[in-house]
Image (cartoon, rainbow, N blue to C red):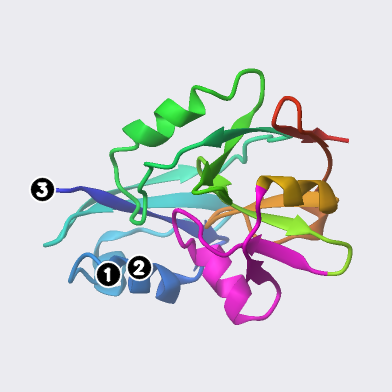
């Protein structure tokens, strides 16, 4: 039976964007995050924590809560993954990790599928064109933070090809734990000969 998981942010006792997580869980399972969290989760009051809930098509199996420390990502290796499929948050990330192993000296990868930019190994990506933040129209996984930002009109989506990366000036990684904050934006240089993006 396929195992899936949700990563949910707890920020000073507040569970962030639970509606968006429940909507995604509902695509694969009849499980209720609302009921499970109310009955089974003891929510920390102070600090930022990662709530990871593992489930299958029938039920929620277990959860963990850990303090959250963000990774430092300043460089991305562009890799091709035309056969990759990660439309759900599968526990089995074997194919993603195989692509990530191709990052050489970079901190993470930026996956290209069918000639279009999708996302990194663990986060959706935004690019800044000088006036607007743009996210790839077809990510591998439609993240909850991405969905929230699109609904609020804070970002827009569009097809982004590798050659288009040279026309943007900044990138930002977002996921359930990494919220939109322009202070996190990274000014970058695009090296087309090495297919890398690195801090400027």
Question: 9 or 195, which lies in front?
Answer: 195
On screen, residue 120 above or below 16: above
* Image quarter hosting the C terminus: top right
The image quarter in which residue 70 lies = top right
Residue at left offset 83%, top offset 61% = 129
Q: Give neighbour class at mark 1: few <14, some 14-19, many 20+ (Cα, 10 Å).
A: few
CA gap between label 3 and label 2 equals: 18 Å
Q: Viewed as shown, does residue 189 lie left or right of 133?
A: right
**Sooner in the amino-acid sequence: mark 3 or mark 2:** 3
Q: Which residue is mark 1?
A: 27
Q: Tell me if I can see residue 132 in this picture.
A: yes
Residue wearing tag 2: 24
Q: Residue at x 52, y 36 (%)?
A: 80
Disc 3: CA contacts within 10 A as few (<14), some (14-19) or many (>=20): few
**Cα gap from disc 3 to disc 1, whole angstroms:** 16 Å
Q: Earlier in the sequence, mark 3 or mark 1?
A: 3
Numbered disc 2: secondary structure: helix
């Amino acid at each position: 039976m396929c195992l899936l998981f949700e990563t949910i942010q707890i920020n000073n006792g507040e569970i962030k964007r639970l509606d968006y997580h429940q909507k995604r869980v509902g695509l694969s399972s009849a499980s209720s995050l609302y009921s499970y969290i109310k009955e089974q989760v003891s929510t920390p009051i102070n600090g930022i924590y990662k709530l990871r809930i593992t489930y299958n098509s029938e039920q929620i199996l277990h959860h963990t809560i850990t303090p959250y420390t963000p990774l430092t990502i300043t460089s991305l290796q562009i890799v091709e993954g035309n056969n990759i499929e990660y439309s759900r948050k599968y526990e089995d990330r074997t194919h993603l990790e195989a692509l990530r192993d191709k990052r050489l000296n970079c901190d993470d990868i930026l996956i290209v599928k069918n000639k279009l930019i999708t996302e990194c190994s663990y986060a959706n990506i935004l690019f800044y064109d000088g006036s607007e933040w743009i996210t790839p129209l077809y990510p591998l996984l439609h993240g909850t933070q991405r969905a929230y930002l699109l609904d609020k009109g804070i970002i827009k989506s569009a097809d982004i090809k590798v050659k288009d990366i040279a026309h943007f000036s900044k990138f930002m990684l977002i996921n359930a734990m990494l919220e939109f904050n322009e202070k996190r934006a990274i000014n970058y240089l695009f090296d087309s000969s090495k297919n890398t993006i690195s801090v400027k």
